[in-house]
Amino acid sequence: MSQENRATFGGRIGAVLVAAGSAVGLGNIWRFPYIVGENGGGAFLLVYLCCIMLLGLPLMISEFSIGASTHKNAVGAFRELNKRWTVVGYLGVLASLLILSFYLVVAGWTAEYTLHSFLANDVVRSTSVEVQTAAFNSFITHPWKPLIYAVGFSLATHIIIVLGVQKGIERASKLLMPMLFVFLFVLACRSMMMPRGLEGLQFFLTPDFSKLTTSSVLAALGQAFFSLSIGLGTMVTYGSYFKSTTHVQGTAVRVSLLDTFVAIMAGLVIFPAVFSAGIEPGAGPSLVFITLPSIFATMPWPALWSSLFFLLLVVAALTSTISMHEAGTAYMEEEYGLSRRKAAWCVTLFVSLLCCFCSLSLGAWSWLKVCGLSLFDAFDYLTANIMLPLGGLLTCLFTGWFFERKRFESQLYPEGKIGRLYPVLRLLIRYICPIIIVILFADNLGII
Ligand code: PHE
């Protein structure tokens, strides 16, 4: 696609909503609570918030600027700015596709929950954790049902991608995101009123630093990057569709705030209910799928609440899968000169195959393990704890030391007046972020 007729996102609000659509998703509502649960609660939350502010935000600004100044896919953007750094683009596209592979599996679970809530089967009305857990496990280990949902989700993403950037992505984001916010708010109020709800609140909000290890700090960093969709070129790709009038820093601040707000709301919904139902907060990826139905079951019209909520989750997941798919599609389209349709098919077929393997590794093919983890968990760990922090580190080093300063500044301050906080941003990008990430890596690899 030539640069002149490349698509753009409409106006300022359009850019915020679309980028927030990528950021807000299962990472906030499914992954965040279970990672917080596994890492001991309040202290982890504090570290997570520091990661968002000190590392996530500067990195998002960098990624948007790289995309907006080149109007190219992640690989093309790095190549144009400095050939030697093209590898960061490749790493990003690969990470997007790997994340998409296991993300589609979980997205498929949400679609199944929407459907079975809608059909109001007995499980929806059960307040018993055992019943919910058994229903969840029997679904995700089923040999073919979860595959159908995951591949169906992949095809739905494909269709929106082929419809085009503006029409498909923007429309979907604009409509349903605000609904999700309201819904989470209502559920948080309900959950906090449940018996023993305050204990859950305490677990989530009171820091206990004795529970914090350096590997949980790396997990917080990985979760922050995962949740903000950074460290892998997705936001470079989205930045490339910005209009020249889009305010890069303002957009990044708004997206980070929205994303963090949704994650905290999800914590406020999940933890009181977890304690109320007597579920182990470190229960892992099943946490949300067991906890949420147990909240709905205590409310009037459980099937209605449950189907609406999971439907919104499906939409939140869809706006995220679109962004990961787009990173791959834009790469195939622009680097290999394929039509959009063909490029999208390449990505869809590849991730559909991988997502089937990920799903099967949880049940019928439980022998499919990498380093003792199921393929599903291995992809999750590899991307969030290694590839995203590494991608983030390289992007910071690139922006801080190799991105032509004038070009970077002209993206941030198109009117030419340098902002007051710019020196702080530069300090973070050049020194603080890379040093923190290197220390965390070195510590986790046992080097220090
Ligand atoms: N940020 C998305 C979420 O929280 C997931 C995602 C990761 C999307 C990486 C794009 C790239 O659900």
Image (cartoon, helix red, strand yellow):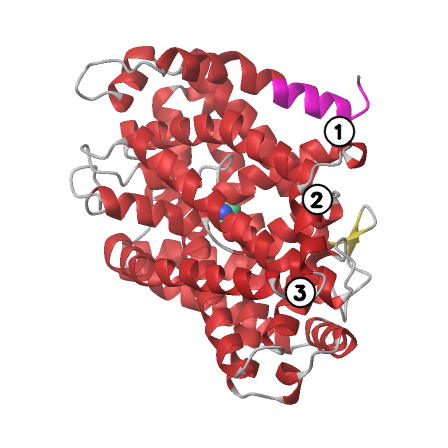
Residue placed at 69% from the left, 19% from the top?
439
Give the residues in magenta. Answer: 436-447
Q: Is residue 438 magenta?
A: yes
Viewer-nearest of discs 2 and 3? 2
Determine whether the residue tagged by mark 2 lies in a helix, strand or loop: loop
| Cβ–Cβ under 8 Å for marks 2 and 1 | no
Determine crowd level at label 3: few under 14, some 14-19, many 20+ residues with C-alpha closer than 10 A: many
* Mark 2, residue position: 41
Of residues 362 and 172, the one drawn nearer to the viewer in this rendering: 172
Circle number at residue 359? 3
Q: Tell me which residue sits at (47%, 46%) in the image.
A: 261
Vertical comparison of 198 with 130: above or below = above
Work out how far the residue at label 2 is from the one at label 1, CA to CA, in angstroms.
Answer: 15 Å
User: Which of the two discs, 2 and 1, labels the residue nearer the N terminus?
Assistant: 2
Within 10 Å of the Cα at label 2, are there few (<14), some (14-19), or many (20+) other Cα atoms? many
Q: Which amino acid type corresponds to the residue marked 3 in the rendered image?
A: Ser
Query: Does residue 448 appear left or right of residue 22 in this picture?
Result: right
Looking at the rendered structure, which numbered label has been put on residue 324?
none
